[in-house]
Image (spheres, grey):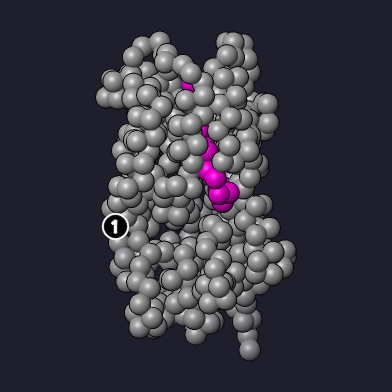
């Protein structure tokens, strides 16, 4: 059998040889593109990087509000029922994806979620294409059947882990060998999350929208309203401060968890914090929200797979406090860019808050500079994209011959 040229992602391929690599076509699959989560954002960012590297980027999903972002970066979208967990639909998706792979001459499939990953893996096997996965979270391990369902995310030729914590979880729970795992932290858009790019007008507008009084310190805990995000621990910690001269914002929608929101509101009233703590449903300008905050909190009682909020806040030079487990241990430099506290405990969080609020201007400036440098060196979107394309090229080199 004659050896065929490798497929690679390179903006300047060597065309001097008859066996010069051609630009690769990469298909990413995920349930939908309707939310602003890390999976959806990362899919668009990698699609843009593929196109910029001279390749062709295709995304298959059930669609959603972010499809237009793909068109803006010259990537393509194919609408398929990838969001379904119905076994029959998942089975039919195998053939749909296999036909797409053959028709569009796709070289590599990158799966980002479990249900579509099962269909994508079998389509990749059927068409003998390279297969990559990204393991985004710990998922619910549960019983044998649940672990079996989750295990699809470990079946890539290479498996991308979004943190060392996730890589360890994969090795421990699923037995994935280290040589198949590539640790690529999520990346922050250093232009969007640049203090110089966030105008004072944007910050003032948001402060007015949220009716924040001038001169009062602002503490913010961003994240959807769900118990493991630790909003109740945060409220208890604020109560222990025994201060009225600050404003504390819990920023995130309840996504239908109205009972939990009512619990939080009752806890606020129980501690007589109605003027101090406020729940804000949504924010369209998170860079401005970070900039008006004096400290940003992640109080998650379960480990965060990565912890995007804490990294984005550091990119803007904000002091951060996070719980001492999961991805936060890799993104916060203790006493230099932020602080880590035991999960689920209000008193240590309250003491850390008091410490941050008491910092002088010189201390805040030093922390801000260190935090920005930390993100720029280790957690940029550019680095994430470059490392992901390196994984693609490595897999294509291994499987793109013959």
Can I make out residue 382 in this image?
no
Can I make out residue 208 in this image?
yes
229 or 390, nearer to the observer:
229
Percent from the top left, x then y, of residue 301?
54, 45
The residue positioned 56% from the left and 59% from the top of the image is: 138
346 falls in the magenta region: no
Residue 235 to residue 151: above or below: above
**Quadrant containing the N terminus in the rendered view:** bottom right
Q: Main secondary structure of the magenta part?
A: loop
State the residue position of label 1.
64
Position of residue 105 in the picture relative to residue 392 (left or right): left
Residue 54 to residue 267: above or below: below
301 falls in the magenta region: yes
The residue positioned 60% from the left and 19% from the top of the image is: 355
Give the magenta-colored segment's residue range.
294-306
The residue positioned 33% from the left and 14% from the top of the image is: 213
**Quadrant containing the C terminus in the rendered view:** bottom right
Position of residue 135 in the picture relative to residue 31 (left or right): right
346 or 109, nearer to the observer:
346
Query: Dot 1: few (<14), some (14–19), or many (≥20) neighbours within 10 Å?
Result: few
Percent from the top left, x then y, of residue 244?
42, 15
265 or 176, nearer to the observer:
265
């Amino acid at each position: 059998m004659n050896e065929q040229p490798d497929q690679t992602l390179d903006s300047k391929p060597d065309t001097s040889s008859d066996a010069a690599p051609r630009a690769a076509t990469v298909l990413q699959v995920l349930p939908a593109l309707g939310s602003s989560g890390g999976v959806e954002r990362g899919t668009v960012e990698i699609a843009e990087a593929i196109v910029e590297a001279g390749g062709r980027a295709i995304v298959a999903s059930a669609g959603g509000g972010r499809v237009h972002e793909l068109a803006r970066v010259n990537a393509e979208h194919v609408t398929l029922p990838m969001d379904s967990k119905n076994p029959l639909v998942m089975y039919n998706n195998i053939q749909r994806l296999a036909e797409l792979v053959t028709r569009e001459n796709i070289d590599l499939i990158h799966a980002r979620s479990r249900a579509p990953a099962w269909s994508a893996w079998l389509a990749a096997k059927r068409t003998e294409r390279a297969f990559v996965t990204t393991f985004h979270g710990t998922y619910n391990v549960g019983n044998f059947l649940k672990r079996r369902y989750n295990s699809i995310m470990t079946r890539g030729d290479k498996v991308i882990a979004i943190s060392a914590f996730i890589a360890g979880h994969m090795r421990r729970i699923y037995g994935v060998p280290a040589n198949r795992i590539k640790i690529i932290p999520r990346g922050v858009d250093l232009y969007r999350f640049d203090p110089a790019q966030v105008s004072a007008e944007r910050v003032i507008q948001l402060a007015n929208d949220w009716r924040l009084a001038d001169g009062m310190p602002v503490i913010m805990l961003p994240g959807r309203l769900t118990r493991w995000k630790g909003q109740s621990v945060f409220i208890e910690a604020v109560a222990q401060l025994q201060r009225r001269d600050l404003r504390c914002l819990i920023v995130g929608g309840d996504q239908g968890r109205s009972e939990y929101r009512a619990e939080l509101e009752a806890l606020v009233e129980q501690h007589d914090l109605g003027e101090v703590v406020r729940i804000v449903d949504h924010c369209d300008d998170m860079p401005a929200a970070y900039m008006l905050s004096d400290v940003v909190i992640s109080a998650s009682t379960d480990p965060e797979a990565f912890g995007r909020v804490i990294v984005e806040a550091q990119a803007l030079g904000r002091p951060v406090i996070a719980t001492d487990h999961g991805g936060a241990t890799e993104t916060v430099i203790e006493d230099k860019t932020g602080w880590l506290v035991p999960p689920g405990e209000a008193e240590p969080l309250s003491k850390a808050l008091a410490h941050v609020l008491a910092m002088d201007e010189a201390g805040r400036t030093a922390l801000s500079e260190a935090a920005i440098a930390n993100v720029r060196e280790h957690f940029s979107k550019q680095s994430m994209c470059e490392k992901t394309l390196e994984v693609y090229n490595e897999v294509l080199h291994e499987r793109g011959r013959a």
